[in-house]
Every structure is written in C-alpha cells, then in structure tokens.
Amino acid sequence: MIETTGTRHRVRGELLGAGGAALLVLAAFAVPQMASESWRDSLFAAAAPIFGHWSPHIGWGTVPAAVLAVAVVTQGPALAQRLSWRPLLGAGYLTALGWAFVLALVDGWERGFTERLADGHEYLAEVPGVTDIGSMLETFADRILDGQPDSWTTHVSGHPPGALLFFVLLDRAGLGGPTWAGIVCVLIGCSTPIAVAVALRALGSEGRARAALPFLVLAPAAIWIAVSADAMFAGVTAWAVALLAVAAGARPAARDTGADSPGLWTGMPAAVVAGILFGFGIYLNYGLILMGFVAVAVLVAARTVRPLVPAVLGALVVVAGFTLAGFWWFDGYHLVVERYYQGIATDRPYGYWWWGNLAATVCAVGLATAAALPRTLTRLRALEPGALLAAAGLCAVAAADISGLSKAETERIWLPFDMWLLVATAYLPQVRARPWLAVQAAGALLLVHLLLTNW
C-alpha cells in the first residue's frame, strides 16, 4: 500500500508539472490572440511566444517524422539500456540527425533548410564583405551600433565576432553558402545530446545518461537545431562541458551505476580544450557566459576543482587572441546592449515576454522535462550529477530571462541551456518513459505542422 501511494504521488507530481507547463504555453499562445491588434503587433512575433507565423501544413518530412517518432518511442528506451556505450552514442547521433532533418523537411527543403541562414539579417550576408579577418576583428565593435552606413546586420551586430568568424572560415574552406552552413550547423548541433550523455557518464551517471538519451535525441528543440547558428553554439558549449566532466573524472560519491570513468581523453589536455571551447563560446554569443552555471555544476558533481586552472588557462588563450586582434569583449557587450534597445526590443513588452520566453522554452524542451523537474530538483541535496546539470540549465534560463536581453526567439537563443534542462528526463521512471517520449514527439510534430518558424 505504501509503495502504491508513493507511486500515485509521483505520478501526480509529474502530471502537475506537465499540466502547469501546458497551461503556461496555452496562455502564452492565447493572450496575444485576445489582445488588441496594436499590442499584438508590438510583440513582433505573429505566433507568439514562438517566432514565426501560423500556417497549418504538411510536407515531405511528415510521414518520415511520424515513423521515426514511433520507432524512438517504442524502441528507444530499451535500446538505450541494451546497447554498449559507443554503438549507443553512434545510434543516438544518427537518430538526432534524422529527427532534425525530417522535421525541417516538413517545411520543404528550401523553406526548412537552405533558406534559414540565407536571410539578409543573418551572418552569411556579411561574409562576402570580410576580405581581411584581422581588420574585421579590429573594427568589429565600431560597427555594432545601428544607424551607421557600415552597421553590421542584426545577427552579426548582436553577437561577438566569433560567430561571423566561424562562417567566414567555413566559406574560406570551400563550404560557402547557406546549404553548407546549414549542414555544418546541424551536424554540430545534433552532437549536443551525445555531449550531454558523455558528460553524465564521465561524472559517474551512465544510468542517467542512458535514460535521458532518447529524450535528448527526440527533443522538440530539433525544430530549431535545423537550422540555426544557435545549434552550433549549443554543440560547441556542450562539448566544452563534456570535456570538463571527462577531465574532472568520475568520483565514487557521485556514481549511481558503478561505471568506470570514460577512457576517452583525461586530465589536463581535456581541461585545456574544454577551456578553449568555453572561451570560444563567449565569442559566439554574449549570453553563453551563463554556461558558467553548468561548468560549476560539473565541478560540484565531481567534487573537485582540479580541472579549473587548466580550463581557465585554455579560455584565456582565446580571450587573449581576440583581444590582441583588437576586440575587447566588454566593449562589445556594452555596445550590443545599446544596439538591442535601438531596435524592436524597445517596443516588445517585457510584461509579456518574461513569461512568454518560458513558454517558448517549454515548447523546446517538451512537457516531459516539466514533468521530471520537480523530482529532479529533490535530488540536488545528494549532489547527483544529473540533478545538478538540470538545475544549472534552469539557472541559466532564469538569469537570461531576468536580464531582459532576450525578449522573444528564446526557443532558438536558449538552445545551449535547454539541452541541459532536458537532463531532468533521466529521472522519469523507466516504466513511464515511453508515454512521456510520446508526449515529446507529439508536441514537436504539432508545433512543426501548425507553425512556420522563422529560424
């Protein structure tokens, strides 16, 4: 009787978490529809809280997406438990790629894939004009503010120069144009679930990694992984966290499976590369400084600060490189805040977007994450790695939301944080994994068929 009552309480908690998140999403969609036209126009998002517009449709990806969703829901949890580690990671990566690709194809090849990065406000618009990388870095901050003849386009001005540099180097490598840029962003972005799993295993939580992986690869966030530069940002910082976890090594007190520490790449080299990736991350997006929450969670979970010094040194190498090239991060940050309020951010009402942002985040991480969060947060006292990483993702989202510097489009902008929030799904009971995976898949399919997203 006690076990039955406890089970009922846990199920009730999951349903309350998911139900509350669902109500938040419904309210965020409903309020703009009931408001005045002028207020609705001030949101600058026709399908608020999602940046896109209403357009019920089907496409070439509809049937493959449904088939893949059914396959993951029915077979994913069992395969995640049964496969050996490396084949599991390979299968997870291919599944994540397939899921992102077929969701994009619901909108068609051009609309869903090649045109996403071809917009005039995107990074690729500025690539042809960069003939001298050194000069671009040296004068980058001078072109951030709007109203100048040579002001950067919206996305370039809103980010540090690392983002533009990435696409310039891609072009110089012979992979120019929106199609190649989209392919590379998706390839990197879809590795994020694998990096999250590697981090969990390195911290001694292979069981949680296996439980979370089906949810990670089937996340609704795949709608924005294909195709956005933020998917690439998520991949870079996720591997920074994974390598930091590998460097920290598994500690007996943090283990829940008895698995050995991964023998991939340990010690100082991994910590240095983690630092380099963290360092490059903050030159991709100013907001990725908030990945510090996840880095701290790794060190707390591993109960060590051994990787901290080499990681900081690695990050400082990147900071020194950009600084010597003429770009000072803090100057760029202050100018981008000023540029932010030169645009539509001044009109977008914070009174809606502070909670609309959270509704958009629920759309990206799915109701299963909301269902699992209450149970996950109860494990913080025991310093369980999965709980710490999920809480760190939640802290990053909260800090970004409070800042007011992300009003709308957070389903895309917060991808690097969302993937760590999804770790909470590892705490859902295995017997209910399939139903919650079905909820995740249904949410993604509903969104992608009802809306045409801008990114």
Image (tube, rainbow, N blue to C red):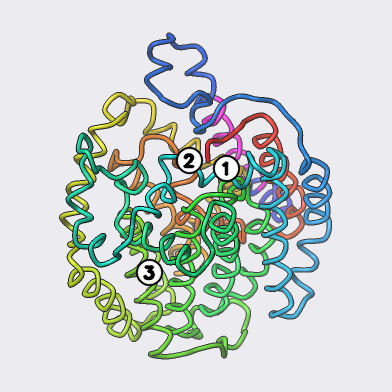
Please report the residue visible at 71 percent of the width from the left and 48 percent of the height from the top.
436
Name the residue carrying label 3.
295
In this view, the residue in front, 76 or 98, is 98
Vertical relation: 268 (above or below) 124: below
**Can you give x and y, in whole percent of width and height, for residue 372 in the image?**
59, 51
Which residue type does callout 3 highlight?
Answer: Ala
Q: Main secondary structure of the magenta part?
A: helix
**Residue 182, quarter of picture:** bottom right
Q: Local crowd at mark 1 within 10 Å, few (<14), some, or many (≥20)?
A: some
In reply to whether residue 211 is colored magenta, the answer given is: no
**What is the CA distance from the residue labelled 2 to the residue labelled 3?**
34 Å
Vertical relation: 48 (above or below) 369: above
> Dot 2: what SS?
loop
Q: Earlier in the sequence, mark 2 or mark 3?
A: 2
Please report the residue visible at 31 percent of the width from the left and 85 percent of the height from the top.
310
Please give the range of residues in magenta.
Answer: 11-26
> Dot 3: what SS?
helix
Dot 1 and dot 3 residues touching (CB under 8 Å):
no
Q: Local crowd at mark 3 within 10 Å, few (<14), some, or many (≥20)?
A: many
Which residue type does callout 1 highlight?
Answer: Glu
**Can you give x and y, in whole percent of width and height, for residue 375 in the image?**
55, 54
Vertical relation: 251 (above or below) 369: below
Which residue type does callout 2 highlight?
Answer: Asp
In this view, the residue in front, 256 or 198, is 198
Q: Earlier in the sequence, mark 1 or mark 3?
A: 1
Name the residue carrying label 1.
115
Dot 2 and dot 1 residues touching (CB under 8 Å):
yes
The tag on residue 274 is none
Name the residue carrying label 2.
119
Please report the residue visible at 41 percent of the width from the left and 25 percent of the height from the top.
44
In this view, the residue in front, 61 or 182, is 182
**Can you give x and y, in whole percent of width and height, for residue 443 in the image?**
67, 39
